[in-house]
Image (cartoon, coloured by chain):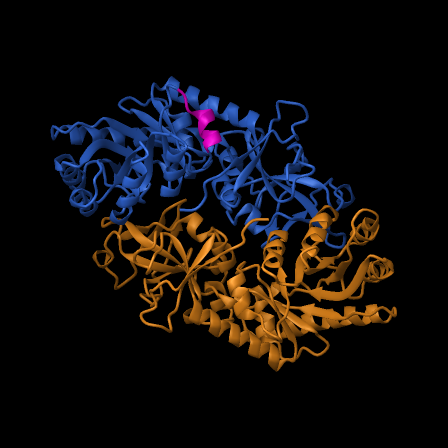
Chain colours: A blue, B orange
Amino acid sequence: MTHKTLFDLPTPSLVLDRAKLARNIRRMALACARNGVALRPHLKTAKSIDVARMVLDDQTPGIAVSTLCEAEYFAGEGLRDIQYAVCITPDKLERVAAIQTTGARLALITDNAEVARAIADAQDRIDTRFRVQIEIDCGENRTGVLPGSDQLIEIARILDAAPNIDFDGVMTHAGHSYGCRSLTEIETLAEAERLAAVTAAEAVRALGIDCNTVSLGSTPTALHARNLDGITEARAGVYMFGDMFQAQIGSCMVDDLAVSVLTEVSSHRTDLNHLTVDAGALAMSKDRSTEAVPNDVGFGLVRDARGRSIAPQMIVKRVYQEHGLVPMPEGQRLEDYPVGDRLRIFPNHVCMTAAMYDRYHVVDSASGNGTDIVAVWPRANGW
Amino acid sequence: MTHKTLFDLPTPSLVLDRAKLARNIRRMALACARNGVALRPHLKTAKSIDVARMVLDDQTPGIAVSTLCEAEYFAGEGLRDIQYAVCITPDKLERVAAIQTTGARLALITDNAEVARAIADAQDRIDTRFRVQIEIDCGENRTGVLPGSDQLIEIARILDAAPNIDFDGVMTHAGHSYGCRSLTEIETLAEAERLAAVTAAEAVRALGIDCNTVSLGSTPTALHARNLDGITEARAGVYMFGDMFQAQIGSCMVDDLAVSVLTEVSSHRTDLNHLTVDAGALAMSKDRSTEAVPNDVGFGLVRDARGRSIAPQMIVKRVYQEHGLVPMPEGQRLEDYPVGDRLRIFPNHVCMTAAMYDRYHVVDSASGNGTDIVAVWPRANGW
């Protein structure tokens, strides 16, 4: 069935505003151009070839992904330069080789000498060349080796020596930038991220080993870095859509948010002065990241069906599997939101919310009233 | 591709233990039989016809669902008696009518007089009979009308008078039983749930209106209710699988948990004494319900690939989109979990975790070593 507007779409549904997406894409492209680095868009948030095609151009030839399912999907759509930006495990190598038979070339990452040896040893059973980068920890304390560590040297030597491996360089991720609460903090952390990557690259080059790629990135640091000398590419993903968390750590404004959940009012409690909507824990996710920032919006900010502000405290306060509970803030009256009324909820963390849906219903707020559905774009969920 | 055991399955994958599922199903059937009520299994957790077939029998002819997508799926599989246990909105009525053309009969619920009138008014445009129940609030403070309220009487009269509506009775849900921390609290709340439903049914009958169905339920109250006099059916869903939260509020034991996520070790940090697994926020969900119970297991309890206990504090402490971070507890050594090692993670809230997957890989812990995949069962996600 074809739906023409947000008013005849089943609820809950995922809505993507193409005009806001385009604006967000331009802003990051300008930030990377200012710093003289290529942008490698991370498609873990969008998981969509249609979004990828809006981002990619001559200056932006490759992408990053977070699952082999995404790699298979984008390779199947003809993309050729794909970084799988999660540490590879040896049993996933056959699947990598199968993807490369499409003509795509994957860049793998590792932080482990045993894994590097296992990739080298795979030459006996897997007929492909593996492109491999080393993951560096720039302070996130999750994965990666430290820039000055013996492990970095050991892994670089193993990868460089293996006849079936093209050692490609180093990469790092300042995921801890999400903990920053000021622009100054983000700038400081962006410089630490740069320094970790460049230091690691120089340590590898001192061994006489080429280090073509020096990659870093997170949406906050890629947007706000003041200097990316020595870096070849920046990765970022969530900037394309934005979310209530990013809006509060300085990555965007609430009016920039490109993705929301269309919902409708399903019940009223006049005695408790709240309504429920048909977007609950599965429609929004259980992400509570705005708990850590000044304006906690519960499980999402409620706006009208056109995406326009109602009240800053019109939020989904509680969720149940298929119910979202919205208390009426000061100045709002239940009777103005009858059962069946349509609303849009802007999520805390768009990577989590979008993953609950298999497609985007695309609207364009720069054209007409912004409620016509101009396209339906599929997503590549799962693993 | 067919996978034979948990050791050749891609990770992360959702694993369902058929032997534990069967045991959990028997336990709830016995609890309902003891109280002399029919069980209406809620399939919002399992979303699987294969699971439904294990639960349904002559004493258990009907199911409950939480989305119209589930209703369409189960009706398509031949099930006939389906309660859609979320307040209906008028624009969903066409979809309900379409489902009923398969021969299935849906029971709808409402707590709103305007909606009751809209269903009655639909007789001019929709050629079907709607079976409708009234939702009663037994103290959850979410949806529903109060048992002694004028709204209950008003809605019952509208539904009873409409020629296209079969008024079917009342239903309530003690979702707030998840807040109980002792068996005594659950028993008290189960009695309040019973009393709310029976009081509402009597108020309707006092009008001279039949009230065939008097339905209640939640996993804790359905299991532990001491008396369900006046009740015709109990609904419950999560009991089939269980989860770390339910295990801590007395609904089951950790060894009863039927669903887990198969993962593998993806990275080691010897300097930080933690490993990462390839099950992160998308593979586990962001549900943090065990934060509220004595033994907080982060984002899930880590056990071995056969589902056997390693250590009570072997947990996924932090999640990133595709990484789960597991600090080594006292007595555990990183070197015993090499990269590629397979583990199983038991989730906080199985309804949320299972929703991230499109299928179950079924094993049977009562047969052999419990790691052979004996079936693959699809799930009906989405809306």
Q: Residue B62's image quarter? A: bottom right
Check the image and name the residue furthest to the bottom.
B34
Relative to B46, residue A107 above or below: above
Viewer-closest of B121 and A296: B121
- Location of residue B83 in the rendering, given as x and y in whole percent from the top left corner: 67, 61
Identify the magenta region: A49-57
Q: Is residue A342 above or below residue B215?
A: above
Q: Is residue B174 visible?
A: yes
Q: Position of residue A337 (x, y in %)?
A: 74, 43
Q: Considering the image in quadrants, where does the N terminus of chain A appear? A: top right
- Quadrant in the picture for residue A345: top right
State whether the magenta stretch is mostly helix, strand or loop: helix
Front one among B9 and A272: B9
Residue at x 82% of width, y 70% of height = B210
Residue B295 relative to residue A164: left or right: right
Instruction: Identify the residue at image location x=48%, y=65%.
Output: B241
Residue nearest the observer in this picture, B239 or A271? B239
Q: Is residue A340 above or below residue A16?
A: below
On the question of residue B288 being in view, the answer is no
Rendered residue at 30%/60% (across/down): B329
Horizontal side of residue B169 vs A324, given as left or right: right
Q: Position of residue B105 (x, y in %)?
A: 70, 61
Name the spot of residue B322 as percent of width and height, x first: 38, 45
B72 sits to left or right of A266: left
